[in-house]
Amino acid sequence: MSENIKRIWWKEEVIYQIYPKSFKDSDGDGIGDLPGIISKLDYLKDLGVDIIWLSPIYASPNDDNGYDISDYRAIHPDYGTMEDFDRLLAGLHARGMKLIMDLVVNHTSDEHEWFEESKKSKDNPYRDYYIWKKGVNGGPPNNWKSFFGGSAWKYDATTDEYFLHLFTQKQADLNWENPAVRENICDTLRFWLDKGINGFRMDVIPLISKRLDFASTDLEYLNDVIAQVYSNGPKVHEYINEMYEKALKDYDIMTVGEGPGISTDVGLKYVGEDRRELNMIFHLDHMFLGHGQKGKFDPEEYGWADIKRIFKDWYEAMEDSGWVSIFLDNHDFPRLVSRFGNDKEYRVESAKLLSLMVFTLRGTPCVYQGSELGMSNVHFDSLEDYRDVETLNYFNEFSKEGMTEEDFLPLVHEHGRDNVRTPMQWDSSKNAGFTEGTPWIAVNPNYKEINAEKVLADPESIYFWYQKIMTYRKENKTLVYGDWNVVEQKSKDIYVYERFDEDNHFYILLNHSNSTQKFELDLSTHNLELHNIDNETLTILQPWEARLYKRK
């Protein structure tokens, strides 16, 4: 099949996500900023990444760390100025790197001027920029729940109506049925594209089209509600295509949509090459594994069999005309080595194994800041140390049902978003070299053992493993475009698959367990090219051992 795939730059390159608030502080205020990022551009270039995805840096009250935007065309003063942004963009381009911005257009902050006007009166010209409804029987218009716990509706006494907020109460959902909203968004796209950015990561993009009956739901699981009620609304493809036609098509850029609720049966509708919509999606099926009825803090059991099934299903769904990004963590999910690996006795080995998987499945790899260091989850002792609105909102909800902080903290240690938002660990000095001031959230206490200075001094470190794999992938396009197939093994703790085309053939062997595993595979025709553990026993994989073989 692979000979039918369209070849293009954004399939071959590597994305690196920067969470600006936590990356590098330049002025001692404890908050990462654009000059801080600029100071580390050579570090990023040396690592081998090609595309920087910048989480929101726009003007915002920061109720949800910038995903509540009050001005789409202004830089938040905490991060710097528009001149700093222009310097960052120029610095990236000078190094042959690209920049994609976070586009958050399902909702705005309630402090955006559109919303401030909208709430003044029912006949205000901006009223229809948002979704307002009358209450029912003295309560909200329906029983929809927020992603972050509680009702998705907030009452406003000024006009005696409720507005919809699928996220925090300060993130009001836009009404995409209004052509003026869509035109304003297209103008915003063109504003940033004309500055020279290289594309957008589109936040919760399948949510922009609402089901206009606004009917209550009988579904019990939040993830089912997301997939069947909030996502994939009746006009979502019309709206994305309109963005493409009016703002995106005239630029050589990349667009990637975050995909809550996008399932394999509708994925190609978003990214099929004939659709004129998005280039690729971040599907979230593997990231939502283990989320129970009430979401991530109501966990259920899952295993590697589920992860493998999901990657297989998505490969088959995309065929040769669609594309996804491959990732195992980002700003919304725990550290990959803590969630999918073993961040204790096999931290280095499992971090290397997981990265090999990310770089050898079919899709554009996306690395979250600090993964190249092997950064792990943080276990703060008190909720007072946490900052994430999602975590705090859920505890507020669960505490009403009798849950104590002592019972809730282990769930936060495992699933909370602040696990990936603690400051980047640059060195072993105070605050891990992130800031000379007081960081907005505490540094992970393990920073003296895990930091960039330390890995850069070790040729066998996770950092140099990442560097090696990125280079290898770029030199072997079969790992980008080639077909993919699982090679079945008797052991459930081994993941063996092949990548192949008319030019090359690769085997990737991964032992994602804490014990040795036997495998059955004739490797006499292949050479061992990459491995994370020295092991001369050909048919035995050590705990968290990863190997890549290439046909001779």
Image (spheres, grey):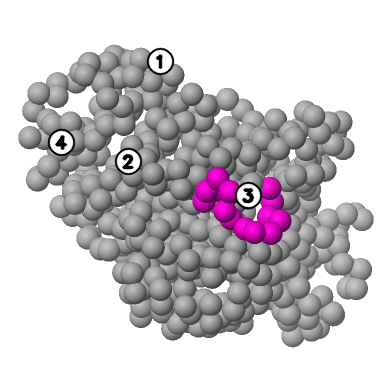
Classify residue 262 as left or right of residue 25. Answer: left
Q: Tell me if mark 2 has few (under 14), some (14-19) or many (20+) residues whose alpha carbon lies within 10 angstroms of its own.
A: few
Q: Quadrant of residue 377?
A: top right
Disc number for residue 550: 4
Disc number for residue 48: none
Q: Earlier in the sequence, mark 2 or mark 1?
A: 2
Q: Residue at x 36, y 78 (%)?
A: 251
Q: Nearer the viewer, residue 90 or 100?
A: 90
Q: Residue at x 43, y 50 (%)?
A: 367
According to the picture, the residue beneath numbered tag 2 turns out to be 459
Q: Which residues are magenta?
A: 425-442
Q: Nearer the viewer, residue 232 or 390?
A: 390
According to the picture, the residue beneath numbered tag 1 turns out to be 515
Q: Earlier in the sequence, mark 3 or mark 2?
A: 3
Disc number for residue 430: 3
From the image, which quarter does the C terminus lie in? Answer: top left
Q: Earlier in the sequence, mark 1 or mark 3?
A: 3
Q: Identity of the amino acid at label 2?
A: Pro
Label 4: element kind = strand
CA gap, disc 2 to disc 1? Answer: 26 Å
CA gap, disc 4 to disc 2? Answer: 23 Å
Q: Is residue 337 magenta?
A: no
Q: Identity of the amino acid at label 3?
A: Lys
Does 71 sit above or below residue 420?
below
CA gap, disc 4 to disc 1? Answer: 25 Å
Q: Nearer the viewer, mark 4 or mark 2?
A: 2
Q: Nearer the viewer, mark 2 or mark 1?
A: 2
CA gap, disc 3 to disc 4? Answer: 44 Å
Q: Position of residue 29 (x, y in %)?
A: 69, 64
